[in-house]
């Protein structure tokens, strides 16, 4: 188990477009090690998603796992651990809704972000196979949040109202009950 260092807002890697991961390297020892280390890092940090740029690897890989927790994410369906390589999002319905988001690369802050709530994701899985998943609601927000990291965007860039950015402690004290992200 290797827990990698999660870089924070201000690090230049978080603000650049990540390069597509070479398909011929999917399944390689280098790839498997990176994915395993990202999974360990995400778990150690208590997150539900992690993008490679967050561990200073500027390539288009993200891992997501939403546990069957029942409390932290409300009635959000669980999602088993999966790897998303070179993902592409297609918005299926422009109707947006908002959630309070946090980020392992922006520790200690929460912000209310509105995003489309019905999307399709086309990606390569950990074997290099083409896959498609369609998600709605909070899961759609999770995917968009993680994949924003692949394009140099943080959730704070998506805030419509800076008054809806706060420290986690104040969030728990004054807003509690809303699901957190990451």
Image (cartoon, rainbow, N blue to C red):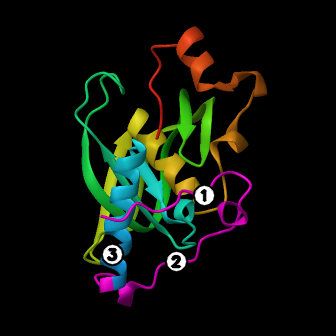
The range drawn in magenta is: 1-29
**How many labels were placed on the picture?**
3
Q: Is residue 180 above or below residue 174?
A: below
Please name the residue that numbered disc 2 is placed on: 20
17 in the magenta segment = yes
Mark 3 against mark 2, which lies toward the viewer?
3
Residue 162, position in %: x, y? 77, 28
- CA distance for labels 3 and 2: 18 Å
From the image, which quarter does the N terminus lie in? bottom left
Residue 106, position in %: x, y? 63, 43
Q: Secondary structure at mark 2?
A: loop
Please name the residue that numbered disc 3 is placed on: 33
- CA distance for labels 1 and 2: 20 Å
Pick whichever of labels 3 and 2 is earlier in the sequence. Answer: 2
Residue 77 figure quarter: top left
Main SS class of the magenta portion in the image: loop
Look at the numbered discs 3 and 2 and tell me whether their residues touch, using CB distance below 8 Å.
no
Crowd band around label 2 with a 10 angstrom C-alpha radius: few (<14), some (14–19), many (20+) = some
Residue 124, position in %: x, y? 35, 71
Residue 7: numbered disc: 1
Residue 140 figure quarter: top left
Q: Residue furthest right?
A: 162
Mark 1 against mark 2, which lies toward the viewer?
1
Pick whichever of labels 1 and 2 is earlier in the sequence. Answer: 1
Look at the numbered discs 1 and 2 and tell me whether their residues touch, using CB distance below 8 Å.
no
Give the residue at x 50% y 70%.
Answer: 60
14 in the magenta segment = yes
Residue 142, position in %: x, y? 45, 43
Crowd band around label 3 with a 10 angstrom C-alpha radius: few (<14), some (14–19), many (20+) = some
User: Can residue 137 be seen at all in this image of the molecule?
Assistant: no
């Amino acid at each position: 188990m290797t827990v990698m260092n999660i870089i924070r807002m201000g690090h230049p890697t978080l603000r650049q477009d990540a390069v597509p991961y070479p398909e011929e390297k999917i399944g390689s020892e280098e790839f498997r090690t990176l994915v395993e280390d990202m999974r360990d890092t995400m778990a150690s940090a208590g997150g539900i998603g992690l993008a490679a740029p967050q561990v200073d690897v500027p390539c288009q890989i993200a891992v997501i796992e939403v546990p069957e927790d029942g409390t932290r994410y409300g009635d959000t369906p669980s999602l088993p651990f999966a790897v998303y390589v070179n993902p592409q999002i297609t918005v299926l319905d422009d109707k947006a809704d908002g959630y309070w988001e946090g980020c392992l690369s922006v520790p200690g802050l929460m912000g209310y972000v509105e995003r489309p709530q019905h999307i399709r994701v086309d990606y390569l899985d950990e074997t290099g196979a083409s896959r498609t998943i369609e998600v709605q609601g909070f899961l759609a927000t999770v995917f968009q949040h993680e994949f924003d990291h692949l394009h140099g965007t943080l959730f704070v860039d998506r805030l419509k109202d800076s008054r809806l950015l706060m420290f986690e402690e104040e969030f728990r004290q004054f807003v509690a009950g809303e699901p957190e992200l990451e």
